[in-house]
Image: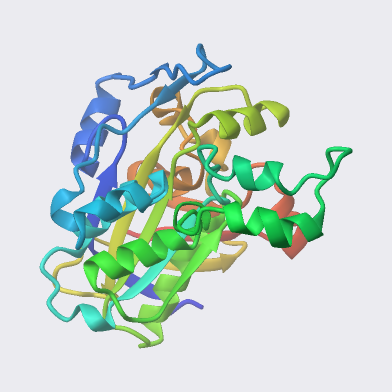
Amino acid sequence: MQNMVASVTGLGVLTGLGSSLEELRQRLNAGESSLVPLGEAGWEERLGSRVAGPRLRELLKRRKDAKLLPRAAQLALPVAAMALGQVQDRESVGLFVGVRREPPDDGAADPAIAASLDESGHLDTGLLSRHGRSLYPPLLPLQTLPNMVLAHVAINLELMGPGDALCGADCAGVQALRLAIHAIAEGRCEVALVIVADSPIDGPSLRDRGRMGQDGPVGEAAVALKLERAGHKDSLMELRDGGAGGQDGPRPGDCAHREQLGACELVDPVLELLLGSGHATGVEASGAWARVLGSEVHISRVL
């Protein structure tokens, strides 16, 4: 485990306070905040931070595909391009993505659901397999399946190396980073791209947070890191997978930047790694993930 180290040779950042790590750091240090009322139906006064844009036209192979990208993919694609830079051999680049659970659809599936309910209003699998299926929009999974974020990035940037998508809890971003460090350290790829993207500012996400008693501000953000072998000549910083135990990093709720950006969920530990303590803790905010597996994991900068 002590040899699981990789160099960060490229970086992409998108937040409500900037589109680079340096801009974000400067604006945070200046005390700026990007929190504004989100205006989501039923949650009009909830504060949150939005990323402007982003502009995707130059990154898409087919311009019309923009409507198929869920918000996490819209954020992931530009930061991936920023971090990747001028890499020529894209066929061997590894891609490791951390995203949250599937995003809600915008009502496109409502007719299919309505046609699948019996007279008492309960879901009938027989109706679902017949009438419901015929009404289900065929392209909707491209917008709602969380692992499609990886697919959208891989297709548009022509990345064909090893990869994985981790979906769900707050620790998914740190776990994606761990997988990429191991892929580099073990020689499974020369270059690995790690993307962590989250946008918990839609109405259903705000509703779910409210149900869990999480009523504070939220923010969308994305970070991408290009990793290469340890000691690379272009290294911006070195990252080590400390495995279970190790030095304590901040829990997601402890990240100082939340006061100005809101809770960026999966992206928070990676932002803290780059901005703050130099450690990222892989643990769900509730601690459930650590309890199930028996320990936390830690990524740290090699100083």
Q: Residue at x 28, y 74 (%)?
A: 159
Q: Tell me where residue 126 appears, x and y as whole percent.
A: 80, 60
User: Left or right of 1: which side holds 112?
Assistant: right
Instruction: Determine whether, in the image, residue 86 is placed left or right of residue 279.
Output: left
Q: Reply above or below: 80 against 90.
A: above
Asked if residue 100 can be seen in this view, the reply is yes
Q: Is residue 247 visible?
A: no
User: Residue 106: horizontal and vertical position, in percent?
Assistant: 50, 38
Extreme residue toward the top, this view: 45
Q: Is residue 129 above or below residue 27?
A: below
Q: Pick whichever, 152 or 212, lies toward us.
A: 152
The part of the image, by quadrant, that contains residue 91 is: bottom left
Q: Quadrant of residue 6?
A: bottom left
Q: Residue furthest right?
A: 120
| Image coloring type | rainbow
Residue 20, x across and y down, in percent: 21, 42
Q: Residue at x 66, y 26 (%)?
A: 210
The quarter in which the C terminus is drawn is bottom left
Q: Is residue 122 left or right of residue 86?
A: right
**Total residue callouts:** 0
| Residue at 10% across, 68% down | 86
| Residue at the far bottom in the pictured view | 187
Residue closer to the observer: 116 or 273: 116
In the image, 258 versus 134, the foreground residue is 134
| Relative image position of residue 181 (x, y in whole percent) | 40, 72
Residue 263 in the figure: left or right of residue 11:
right
**Which residue shows up at 40% across the image and 64% down it?**
150
Q: Is residue 231 above or below residue 263?
A: below
Looking at the image, is 184 positioned above or below residue 121? below
**Residue closer to the observer: 250 or 18:** 18
